[in-house]
Image (cartoon, rainbow, N blue to C red):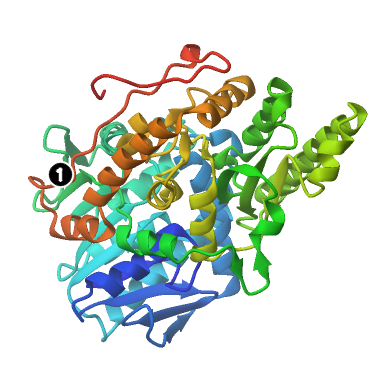
Amino acid sequence: MNILSYRGPSTAGGVSSALARIIETCADGNQRWWYMDGCSMETRESAGSAPISVNKLPQAVIDGHYSYCNSFIWPILHDLPEHATYNERDRVLYQIFNTRFARQILRSGTLKSDLCFVNDYQLALATGLIARSQAMKIILFWHVPWPTSVSAEHAPHIAAIAEGLLGARRLGFHTEEYALNFLNFVEEHLPGYAVDTESMSIVNRRDPSRVTELTALPLGLDFRFWAQTAIESSPVHKDLDVREKIPCRFVLSVDRADYTKAVMERLNAIDTFFEQNPHRLGETTFVQVCQPTRTGLPAFDKYWEKCRKRAEQINARWRSHMQEAGRHRTLDSNPRWQPISWLDKPVPPKVLAWLYSKADSMLINPVRDGLNLTAKEFAVCSSKGSLILSPGAGVWHEIGNNTVPLPSLDAEVMAGQIEAALKMPLGERTERLQKMKAIIRANTLKTWWRKFEAGTRSDQVVVSFPRRPAANQAESGELLLLRGSAG
């Protein structure tokens, strides 16, 4: 099999790491990975083998592709069109990037087989181009959401991406919602294709032999890897010692400074949390493992700066408040305490596992997130923590029934749910974690890969779909429990 992805095995990120482990644990000696490293298209036979540079792309093409992916496609796919910036030149360069990538694959004499696994939106158009070769079979997994709606202004550009995806024989999504959104979009905007919602398939009207089968199969986690990493975990790695940042019990968040992750909403909720719970001052901190992302693009650079500035304001406010309130003794006994402790450097797996295992709670509150593997990693590594989760994360559809839900990103609602999670009895935390572990163990990375690669329907992972909690269900300080049948 040939694996085509934008990023290679040495790149940070949950999806890239997952692909690397797929090759390591599921490889049969017949894989080859194709990806970009800077301006160079590279290939290698395994995650640990030496890369071979096969092509160079002009820097202008790389930059335009990068801008189009992140300034336009990314916000549209996450149902956040207010953040989208369209640039026609970038669209053309995105097209050129995909064309050259596809051309290199088709001309290569080192392909391992006629089967290609394409990964994600950066290569959406390449999928359709490669599919024109009757000798190539393509399966593609879409790691980001498909939007619930697309405006008339943006629809033609997203339709081009959708048509590229329809070059795949099998198209995977994390959730049933994303798959249905895609079917609805194709039915509305691509008249050249016939949609069958019942069979979850799409037929090319011009060539009925070309059928794309859709499947909802959430990405699995390498359970054994994280369970073992938790056993070997350590707060220290080289010059990094996270204990210096954590002088007391803590609530953990791990993500990038991306508006889809709702980092600013989280910071506002932390501020409100201390307003509602002044007894937590000096005894609870919020650890943010959060780094800048998509650097060089103004929207993301500005968001990072705003988040850091807001965190500094919150720290200054509450340390000053404690001093003014005469709580010098509390600060003197715990001089390193901050409401927010920020780690803006990459954290290696063993240190991350230590943070997962020691956290009282983990807070994951995206507006929209394709899946969110950190939720699964936390559940595997923790033995005592509670998970606070937004239904905006795709992983909600697997484990949401066992979390403390965030029915809205309102600061008061979030603050109330954080306090409820911290007050949850240990026995209930343990019970919920055990249920999450069982779900995650049933859908390991290897299980996911074998089922997606094989395309079986009868034995796909069965997941429950918790109801999204309504915004009016939340009351400050009360724990929301989702009971009953899945919906």
Residue at 51% x, 34% y is 367
Residue at 20% x, 55% y is 452
Which residue is nearer to you in this view: 303 or 126?
303
> On screen, 144 above or below 29?
above
Label 1: which residue? 205
Q: How many marks?
A: 1
Dividing the picture into quadrants, the one containing residue 403 is top left
Dividing the picture into quadrants, the one containing residue 34 is bottom left
Q: Position of residue 189 (x, y in %)?
A: 32, 35
Q: Quadrant of the N terminus?
A: bottom left
Residue at 41% x, 50% y is 373
Q: Position of residue 242 (x, y in %)?
A: 65, 59
Residue at 54% x, 76% y is 39
Q: Position of residue 301 (x, y in %)?
A: 70, 52
Left or right of residue 80, residue 314 in this image: right
Q: Amino acid at mark 1?
A: Arg
Which residue is nearer to you in this view: 147 or 167?
147
Left or right of residue 386, residue 416 in this image: right
Q: Secondary structure at mark 1?
A: loop
Pointer 1 local density, CA inside 10 Å: few below 14, some 14–19, many at least 20? few
Q: Quadrant of the C terminus?
A: top left
